[in-house]
Amino acid sequence: MTLIITAIAAIVATIIRFAKSEVADRFHLGFLSLMFWGATLMWCVDGFACLAEGEPFVELVDTAAMADDALLGLCVVVLGLVVWGIVCVTKQPKAPAIA
């Protein structure tokens, strides 16, 4: 579930980044997108490590484990949004180009 939740967050952040390109630099949406894609890659590596140990890639049978994984995924997304918010507040936005 952590992989699924972070992948959804990464896809949404990427879509917003490219759909709203005029505000992407101002709000550092590329940073947010890369952060979520990095987390998604991390969970993929974890899934492959589980496969190497003989465990399932994604746990979908045990509801308690799914709930724990979903909570972890939501915590990762919220923490990513907090870090992104701090970056947005501390970094100065780029000045718009004068035509």
Image: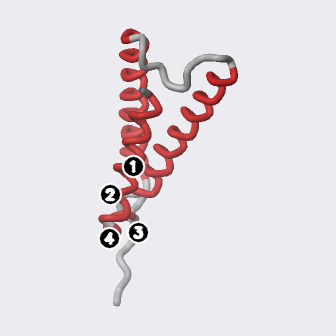
Q: Residue furthest right?
A: 52
Residue at x 44% of width, y 28% of height: 2
Q: Quadrant of residue 79?
A: top left
Q: Amino acid at mark 2?
A: Ile
Which residue position holds label 2? Answer: 16
- Quadrant the N terminus occupies: top left
- Quadrant the C terminus occupies: bottom left
**Residue 95 x, y percent position in the rendering:** 38, 73
Q: Quadrant of residue 94?
A: bottom left
Which residue position holds label 1? Answer: 11
**Residue 52 x, y percent position in the rendering:** 69, 23
Above or below residue 5? Residue 88 is below
- For label 2, the crowd category at 10 Å Cα-Cα, with few meaning under 14, some 14 to 19 and many 20 or more, is some
Q: Mark yes or no: residue 52 visible.
A: yes
**Mark 1 and mark 3: Cα distance apart in space:** 25 Å
Among numbered discs 4 and 1, the one appearing first in the sequence: 1
Residue at x 44% of width, y 51% of height: 33
* The label number, if any, that marks residue 94 in the structure image: 3
- For label 3, the crowd category at 10 Å Cα-Cα, with few meaning under 14, some 14 to 19 and many 20 or more, is few
In terms of secondary structure, where does tag 2 sit?
Answer: helix
Q: Which dot, 4 or 2, sits closer to the camera? A: 2
Q: Mark yes or no: residue 89 visible.
A: no
**Residues at badges 4 and 3 in contact (C-beta under 8 Å)?**
no
- For label 1, the crowd category at 10 Å Cα-Cα, with few meaning under 14, some 14 to 19 and many 20 or more, is some
- For label 4, the crowd category at 10 Å Cα-Cα, with few meaning under 14, some 14 to 19 and many 20 or more, is few
* The label number, if any, that marks residue 22 in the structure image: 4
In terms of secondary structure, where does tag 4 sit?
Answer: helix
Among numbered discs 1 and 2, the one appearing first in the sequence: 1
Q: Quadrant of residue 20?
A: bottom left
Among numbered discs 4 and 3, the one appearing first in the sequence: 4
Q: Amino acid at mark 4?
A: Glu
Residue at x 42% of width, y 46% of height: 10
